[in-house]
């Protein structure tokens, strides 16, 4: 079956998107591993991160969805 150049270009873009997604996921895993090493060194880290997340939720000027997204991201640093 002969593919159209447009189809091949679309498949290339899709493949590149998957590669980028995998690279981002690997970077996140690496960062989480690095943070786990440092979390043992500071017993107050999780508590401070939670306080920051709660403070973010009290901010004004952003929508609730945006603030909750920020809080989720910040809590992910625990």
Image (spheres, grey):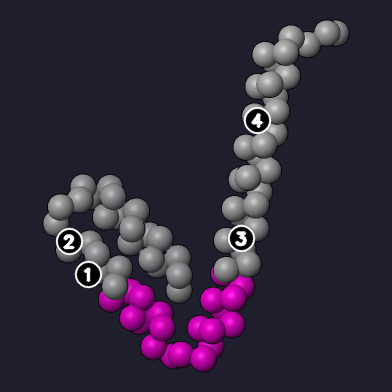
**Residue 24 in magenta stretch:** no
* Magenta residue span: 32-51
* Dot 3 or dot 1, earlier in sequence: 3
The reply to whether callout 2 and callout 3 are in contact (CB within 8 Å) is: no
Q: Identify whether 72 is placed above or below 51.
A: above
Q: Identify whether 2 is placed above or below 52.
A: above
Q: Residue at x 38, y 60 (%)?
A: 72
The circle on residue 55 is 1
* Dot 1 or dot 4, earlier in sequence: 4
Nearer the observer, disc 2 or disc 3? 3
Give the CA separation, mark 4 to mark 2. 38 Å
* Dot 4 or dot 2, earlier in sequence: 4
The reply to whether callout 2 and callout 1 are in contact (CB within 8 Å) is: yes
| In-image side of 6 versus 70 (left or right) | right
What residue would you read off at disc 4? 14
Query: Residue 11: image x %, image y %?
Result: 70, 24
Give the CA separation, mark 2 to mark 1. 7 Å
Q: Residue at x 63, y 45 (%)?
A: 20
What residue would you read off at disc 3? 27
The circle on residue 59 is 2
């Amino acid at each position: 079956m002969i593919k159209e150049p447009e189809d091949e270009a679309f498949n290339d873009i899709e493949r590149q998107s998957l590669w980028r997604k995998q690279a981002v996921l690997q970077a996140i895993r690496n960062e989480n591993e690095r943070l786990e090493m440092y979390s043992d060194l500071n017993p107050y880290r999780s508590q401070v991160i939670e306080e920051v997340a709660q403070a973010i939720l009290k901010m004004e000027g952003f929508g609730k969805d945006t603030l909750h997204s920020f809080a989720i991201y910040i809590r992910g640093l625990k």
